[in-house]
Amino acid sequence: MNHESLTPANNLPVGAQLRAARLTRNLSQAEFAALAGIRVKHYQRIETGSVLPRLGTLTQIAFALGLRVALVADSEEDV
């Protein structure tokens, strides 16, 4: 079982985490977008940080990468 997660705990933006995970799997953005079932332009914007994905989209992406989505809120921040 893969215990790799997308989480703010590693101090990397979500897009950077997604890019690293995608490249580790040797997938192009177009290949990955098709695998995740989202438009390539939308995925490119997420990966570059132009937009933040909705939870459902992030869950789709994480599932396609075989990752868990860990929602971690710092107790000192407002949610």
Image: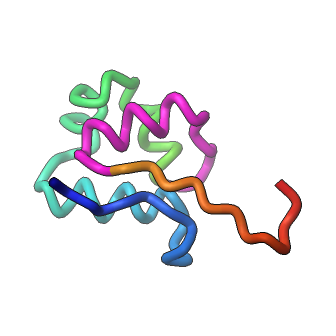
Q: Residue at x 51, y 45 (%)?
A: 46
Rendering coords of residue 51 (x, y %): 62, 44
Rendering coords of residue 21 (x, y %): 27, 59
Rendering coords of residue 39 (x, y %): 39, 24
**The residue stretch that appears in magenta:** 48-67
Task: Locate residue 16 relative to residue 78 in the image: left or right.
Answer: left
Q: Residue at x 24, y 26 (%)?
A: 34
Task: Locate residue 69 relative to residue 72 in the image: left or right.
Answer: left
Residue 29 or residue 9, whichever sits in front: 9
Label tally: 0
The quarter of the picture where residue 77 lies is bottom right
Q: Was residue 63 drawn as part of the magenta stretch in this picture?
A: yes
Up the image or down, 77 lies above or below 1; here it is below
Q: Residue at x 31, y 38 (%)?
A: 63
Q: Residue at x 84, y 74 (%)?
A: 76
Rendering coords of residue 47 (x, y %): 45, 51
Quadrant in which the N terminus is drawn: bottom left
Residue 1 or residue 47, whichever sits in front: 1
Dominant SS in magenta: helix
